[in-house]
Image (cartoon, rainbow, N blue to C red):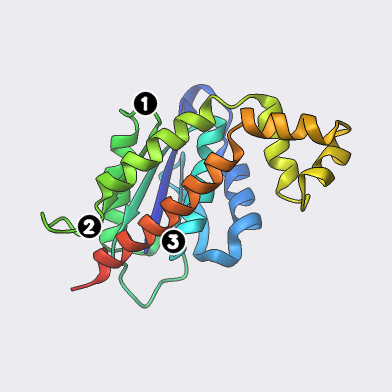
Amino acid sequence: MFVISADQRGSRAREDLVGPAREAINDQFGDSLALPADRNAGDEIQLLTDSAATVLDITIMLARTGNWSIGIGVGTVRTPLPGAVGEATGDAFIAARDAVTAAKRRQTRVAVRGGDLTDAAWPTAEDAQSLLDPLLELLRRRSGQGWELHDVLTSAPTQADAAHVLGITAAAVSDRAKVAALKIERDARKALVRLLENLATTATTP
């Protein structure tokens, strides 16, 4: 299982972002969550899922804003699950707590912890971190126009459709997609999802 603990940066000097972010996560990813995302410790969001793709999507969504330190914990969770994520326990929650603390010291503000900690284990949380960090840095440098195209393509089936929505030529869409490294992002996401899935397997296999 995967746990995300995300701590709002500078929460004492800024408006509360936990409520809106929690609602957005539950609206967009609710079907993929084992329990609804909820507020934890005042200025944190916490969520539980068994979907590596969902973990990556939510991590990127939060990291894109620059407002969060994000910890990803991988491990077992005690069952049966309670009614709220704040009442759940297990190794994944401990790992997420360690991860969010570590994230505050990292350039990308995201950290991965957990999995099988034996020397022979593969993959490890460090393997996931090593692939996640460059992807996050790539996305951090993406322009507003690049993100605009990315967002349009989530609902437009083709680049030609995106060109129509944006009011630009298909050639301009193609150029913008290359500059935004959309294909590189897509390929990296696929690899990261597979790696996280394998990491979760090592964390739950005796």
Any part of residue 61 in sight: no
Crowd rating for badge 1 (residues with CA inside 10 Å; few <14, some 14–19, many 20+): few
Q: Amino acid at mark 1?
A: Gln
Quadrant the C terminus occupies: bottom left
Do residues under tags 2 and 3 come within 8 Å of each other at their CB atoms? no
The residue at the far left in this view is: 119
Where is residue 111? Give x, y as percent.
Answer: 34, 40
Crowd rating for badge 2 (residues with CA inside 10 Å; few <14, some 14–19, many 20+): some
Q: Nearer the viewer, mark 2 or mark 3?
A: 2
Q: Earlier in the sequence, mark 2 or mark 3?
A: 3
Q: Amino acid at mark 3?
A: Val
Q: Nearer the viewer, mark 2 or mark 1?
A: 2
* Residue 52, image quadrant: bottom left
Measured Cα–Cα span from mark 2 to mark 3 = 29 Å
Where is residue 92? Give x, y as percent.
Answer: 30, 58
Where is residue 93? Give x, y as percent.
Answer: 31, 56
Please name whichever residue, 145 or 172, is drawn nearer the observer in this view of the structure. Answer: 172
Q: Residue at x 51, y 47 (%)?
A: 187
